[in-house]
Amino acid sequence: MAQSLAKKGPGDSDSPDVLLIKSLIRWSEAKAGAIVAGCREEHLHFLDLPFYRTGTIAKKPLTDEDVRIIRELIEKVVPAQIYVAGDLSDPHGTHRVCAEAIFRAVQVIERETGHRPEVLLYRGAWQEWAPHEIEIAVPLSPRDLQLKRAAIFRHESQKDSALFPGPDDPREFWQRAEDRNRHTAAVYNQFGLPEYFAMEGFVRWNGIPV
């Protein structure tokens, strides 16, 4: 493995051994973050979707296999709501592809059964929904925000610096996320609505593919 790392050039795919190590790291980080947030281990599902397994930043095109895997999980769990990262302008592209896979799976279920789970879109660290777009606003206490930060910190390989921070923005990912939540609460307060420490905004997916 050391030899393959030494020979790897910019843009080259990782070796199978490196891919396995990276996947184990991200799996353990995601598991730790979910448990901190209160999710029980037996309720976690790691899909390992085919589109993601390239070993490079560029991912494979979405396929019916990706959609099938997600659909089968939805049919197994039967959730009332599905929360999806709504960063559809995500420069990395992964959030957009994952969202598209979920949307397609939900549409198949709706065509075959006549109903589907409610899909709620949230934002990450990059941007917030405009106030007029937000359909569900969830107040966050200082303790809630500390819990969110603790969960983010479990993603040790990702947290120290944002991969796509934007121009002239030195803040780390967790700082951007917290600032976004607190700013949303401040905007609601300016409207004369109840004052909260922070808020998380959600938008309902309208059934139209991205």
Image (tube, grey):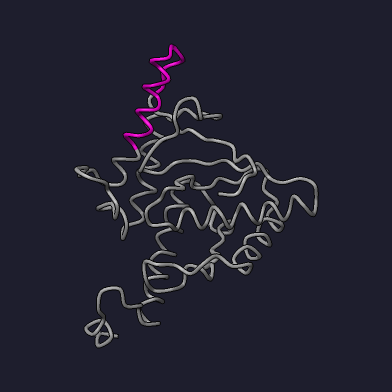
Q: What stretch is highlighted in magenta?
A: 178-196
**Which quadrant is home to the N terminus?**
bottom left
The reply, left or right, for residue 77 in relation to residue 162 is right
Relative to the observer, which residue lies in front, 76 or 190? Answer: 190
Residue 69, compared with residue 145, is above or below; it is below
Q: Residue 149's quadrant in the figure?
A: top left
Relative to the observer, which residue lies in front, 105 or 192? Answer: 105
Q: Position of residue 28 (x, y in %)?
A: 42, 64
Give yes or no for residue 123 being in the magenta stretch.
no
Residue 185, compared with residue 128, is above or below; it is above
Q: Which residue is drawn at 50% across and 57% down?
A: 97
Q: Position of residue 34 (x, y in %)?
A: 47, 52
Q: Which residue is drawn at 31% across and 77% down?
A: 12
Give yes or no for residue 184 being in the magenta stretch.
yes
Question: Which residue occupies the extreme bottom position in the image?
Answer: 3
Q: Position of residue 119 (x, y in %)?
A: 61, 43
Relative to the observer, which residue lies in front, 148 or 204? Answer: 204
The reply, left or right, for residue 141 in relation to residue 50 is left
Q: Main secondary structure of the magenta part?
A: helix
Residue 21, compared with residue 153, is above or below; it is below
The reply, left or right, for residue 191 in relation to residue 168 is right
